Image (cartoon, helix red, strand yellow):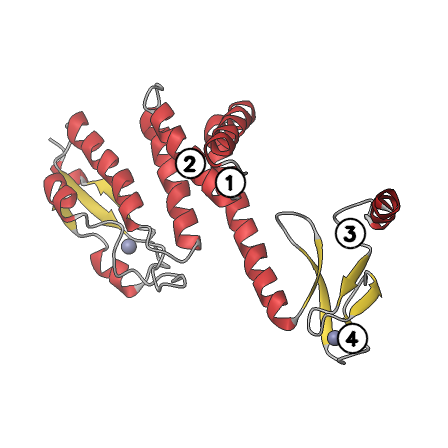
Amino acid sequence: MGWLDFSKKKQIEPEDKSVPLDVECPYCQVPLGKFPSRKGVCPHCQKTYWVRTDPFSRERLVLTEDGVRKNEEQQFRYQLISEFKRSLFNVIGEDEFEKLYQETKEAFVKKRGKAPLEGDLMWSISNKMILLSAKSRDWRAKTGMIYWAQSQFVYGEGKDYAYIREKDFELELKFLRETGTTDMVEILATPNSCPECQRFDGKKFTIEEALDQKILPHKKCTTEPNKAGVGWCRCLYVPSLDHLG
Ligand SMILES: [Zn+2]
Ligand SMILES: [Zn+2]
């Protein structure tokens, strides 16, 4: 009996896990038979189901209308993580990134006993990259790029990224202070910046004031606001030329 059960089970095991052989209606759970290749109507409950792919596992899914909405959010998140990955990858190159990726993933699995979520993994890699960059010759440029990538990711997640960009601006202002050509900076907005950013365009501050007040990024920026209403401030500090000594 045991052996028969086993062989039976083996037979119904689908060959390719990404395309299950049979599936249930996502509304009423009545078997739909063969896995549908496209949108359809359940013969039992008459509701419309959709066929989508999970962007992370590449698994085919039969979904309710609500499920489709969640899948769209997952697609957005997948894009966001891919962009984050690409930005990090550009800082250190393919080989080094791949090495860091594998190392960090293995360390995660060892510590938690399961594979990390891709977003958590990328975040962890970016922090490691900041530490590693400190040892390189062009550390300031590299660290700035990583902070920028982290900020974009957090902004895309619909959160406030100001605390990360502030670190980037702090590095830059300290660098300007150390090179000693000027003690003043001017704020430069873009033509597409929001009214709050425009208000500051051309305003001058001492480097000390800019460091103390953490003027950039503008906390009230509304340029392309994310889910939390936080805009992506494109303003920059430039050395103020009238004060070149
Ligand atoms: Zn149904
Ligand atoms: Zn701004």
Circle nearer the N terminus (2, 1): 1
Q: Check mark 4 vs ligand 1: CB closer than 8 Å? yes or no.
A: yes
- Left or right side of 21 for 73: left
**Contact (CB < 8 A) between labels 3 and 4?**
no
Residue occupying image coordinates x 87% and y 44%? 7
Label 2, secondary structure: give it.
helix
Q: Which residue is mark 2?
A: 124
Circle nearer the N terminus (2, 3): 3
Q: CA distance from mark 3 to mark 4?
A: 19 Å
Q: CA distance from mark 4 to mark 2?
A: 44 Å
Disc 3 marks a residue whose amino acid type is: Val
Q: Which of labels 4 and 2 is toward the front? A: 4
Relative image position of residue 194 (x, y in whole percent): 32, 63
Residue occupying image coordinates x 36% and y 61%? 223
**Contact (CB < 8 A) between labels 2 and 3?**
no
Q: Which residue is mark 4?
A: 42
